[in-house]
Amino acid sequence: MKRRLNMFFTIIAVISFLAFSVVSCGESGSKGVFDITSPYENVNWSAFGQYKAALHSHTTNSDGSVALSGSVDAHYAAGYDILATTDHVWKRVGVTEVYLDFITTDYLQTSYNGTELTSLTAARIAELDAGANRENRPMLLVPCSAELAIGGDPTPDEANVFFWGAGKDTMPAVPKAWTKGIDAGLADANDSGAIFFINHPGRSTNAQNYKHGGASDLANPSNMSTWVRRYVNLYQKYPANTLVGMEIFNRRDQDSRHDRILWDNILKTVIPSGRTIWGYANDDSHSNGAIAVNYNIMLMPENSLTNFRAAMIGGHSYMVTCAAYNERVGVEGTVESPTLLTRVSSSPPQDTNRPRISGITVDKNAETITITATDADRIDWISEGKVIHTTTGGTGTLNLLDAEIEPQVGSYVRANIIGEYGMAVIQPIITKRIADK
């Protein structure tokens, strides 16, 4: 009899607990559980350095107006920790273009097949490595980098390459496959150890000439399925350690204002299949007056080529800009006729008081994402191209289980951290819906 009573009370207790759990979940407003995967999971924000990187620049070795040494010196003086000089694999001579067929940047080479190149001296490279006249803070020169744009289909893309043939005694020749377009070029380079990202896609889609704003505008080329599918196919075809991402800020955002829209459209298509595309922000500088509009902050234990490569592949970075048309950063006037603020349009632009992130943390049990930043007025939380929540100030938490937020969460969340003098943009954090509560 006593055993039966104990069993009876045990059953009653279990039923009561389950009933309480159901009521509690209902009261919380949560309908789902998310498996959150963050590229910042292994970033030690208190111990890692934040290294300012310029990953798209040009010199007189292709179509820039400043010699390689002048460009390097200007980036060094502007506080850059990493520089990839990405000259085209051709040189403009007068009104003609001379195809050099090799990756131009080993920083020391003075000529190629009779074409004169500007270069650095070994002594200057040693000074950069030592951080001379800069409190021993070196500037890393990324080897074997270039911009590839030498032919292809009616809408050829341009791509930056890094580490093509790094460690070899001679600079590598560019395979003729690149004259057939980006797909053929990537296929040829797939096992080379090189890393690529696609540059300013708005030039290919013609979104650069579309003046309207907003992710809901179906006439915007960045929303057109033809263009989205074209890039989705490339990212699904080539591995994540080869084709790592896409440039979503270029120069003063003239050509790239809708490239964040394209990025979101690609992300919501590829992330459910296990692919992530990292964003990059670059000056595409052709003169020293164009430096410091955009940059990437690489999060690394120390500034080395090995860590830089790992950060490129793993998404251990965030972007900073002072010019974003659609987000109304550094811009005045109407959407149809925007103009840049003086501090943004000056050459070079004012590079102070831009948002700086000091932490991105995920609580997988509470299913929250928290960002801590300085020089920020608000954080816009974005999922699949839509702002799903806004928090004020530089520190904000997104509760994925909030009754109003949870139904809006798609396959990923990213954030724009916006201040008076600029905007920081984080890489996408995967929010996979795995069960119902």
Image (cartoon, rainbow, N blue to C red):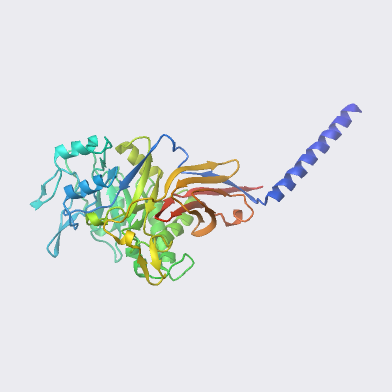
Residue drawn at x 67%, y 52% is 29
Q: Could you tell me which quadrant the N terminus lies in?
A: top right
All told, the count of numbered labels is 0
Q: Nearer the viewer, residue 17 or 343?
A: 343
Residue 300, image x and y in percent?
A: 37, 38
Can you name the residue that lies furthest to the right here? 1
Q: Is residue 206 left or right of residue 360?
A: left
Q: Nearer the viewer, residue 221 or 118?
A: 118
Work out whether residue 401 can be spotted: yes
Residue drawn at x 16%, y 41% is 170
Residue 95, image x and y in percent?
A: 14, 65
Residue 148, image x and y in percent?
A: 25, 55
Quadrant of res 389: bottom right
Q: Is residue 45 left or right of residue 348?
A: right
Q: Nearer the viewer, residue 309 or 373?
A: 373
Q: Is residue 131 left or right of residue 401?
A: left
Work out whether residue 167 can be spotted: no
Q: Nearer the viewer, residue 39 or 169?
A: 39
Residue 206, image x and y in percent?
A: 34, 67
Quadrant of res 358: top left
Is residue 435 positioned above or below 137 on the image?
Answer: below
Residue drawn at x 35%, y 63% is 341
Can you name the residue that lies furthest to the left here? 114
